[in-house]
């Protein structure tokens, strides 16, 4: 097991499914965990679960489709924990539908959460990491669909392909601003690999097609 004492992690969509399993694994390793999610009931249940492990954890209401809520959640997280060392952009949605039946609204709703939400979340996390100095990590949860496509899930697959490109674009020099100290590491974790990681870190995992 990793030793993450003193580490502060943000997990979007951390109130259920893969997100909660990762939050649980982080908590078991000693990290302080900030759970971001839309559903107040699920947020409360997730925090009860994490606190039962003896972890320090707090939930923050956040819909990653809303830029203002992301900025507010990051400020609240920093006020509560003082820093963020890693950020897991896990929140995601899908709207399965035949391609010719897909509306602009269907497409935009998925992109807004899975791609724009991930971008905004990572931007706010990295902004803090650069200002603080000392480095940090941002992690995006992608999908095999980003490579092979997915029947009836064109918007989801495209959003995850965009996420992969976004992460690859965060290497040097964009991540090393001026004299900011430390290395800023970004990576994509394919969804299947995220499940394996979550299972490795936590024995309990309840699948949830929509984390958040």
Image (tube, grey):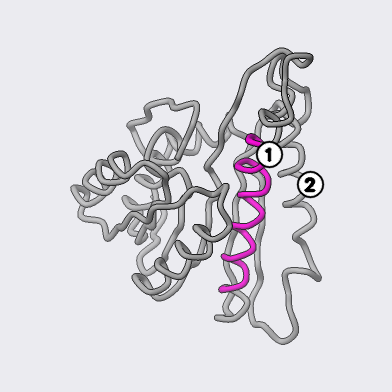
Residue 197: x %, y % from top left: 49, 38
Q: Is residue 40 above or below residue 85?
A: above
Q: Residue at x 62, y 50 (%)?
A: 118
Magenta stretch: give its range: 109-128
Q: Is residue 187 magenta?
A: no
Q: Is residue 160 above or below residue 170?
A: above
Q: Main secondary structure of the magenta part?
A: helix
Mark 2: few, some, or many residues within 10 Å (few <14, many ≥20)? few
Mark 1: few, some, or many residues within 10 Å (few <14, many ≥20)? many
Q: Residue at x 66, y 31 (%)?
A: 143
- Residue 111 is labelled as 1
Q: Residue furthest bottom?
A: 179
Q: Is residue 123 magenta?
A: yes
Residue 177: x %, y % from top left: 73, 78
Compare marks 2 and 1 and give the one earlier in the sequence: 1
Q: Secondary structure at mark 1?
A: helix
Residues 206 and 25: in front is 206
Q: Residue at x 57, y 65 (%)?
A: 125
Q: Is residue 140 above or below residue 74?
A: above
- Residue 165 is labelled as 2
């Amino acid at each position: 097991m990793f030793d993450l004492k003193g580490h502060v992690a943000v997990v979007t969509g951390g109130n259920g499914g893969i997100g909660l399993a990762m939050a649980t694994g982080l908590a078991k390793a000693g990290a302080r965990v900030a759970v971001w999610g839309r559903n107040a009931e699920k947020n409360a249940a997730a925090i009860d679960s994490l606190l039962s492990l003896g972890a320090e954890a707090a939930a923050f209401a956040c819909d990653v489709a809303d830029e203002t809520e992301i900025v507010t959640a990051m400020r609240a997280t920093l006020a509560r924990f003082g820093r963020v060392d890693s950020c897991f952009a896990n929140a995601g949605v899908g709207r399965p539908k035949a391609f010719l039946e897909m509306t602009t609204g269907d497409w935009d709703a998925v992109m807004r959460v899975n791609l724009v939400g991930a971008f905004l979340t990572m931007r706010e996390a990295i902004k803090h990491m650069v200002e603080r100095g000392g480095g940090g990590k941002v992690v995006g949860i992608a999908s095999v669909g980003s490579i092979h496509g997915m029947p009836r899930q064109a918007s989801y697959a495209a959003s995850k392909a965009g996420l992969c490109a976004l992460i690859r674009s965060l290497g040097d020099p964009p991540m090393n601003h001026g004299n900011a100290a430390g290395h800023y590491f970004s990576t994509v974790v394919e969804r299947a690999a995220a499940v394996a990681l979550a299972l490795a870190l936590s024995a309990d995992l309840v699948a949830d097609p929509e984390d958040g």
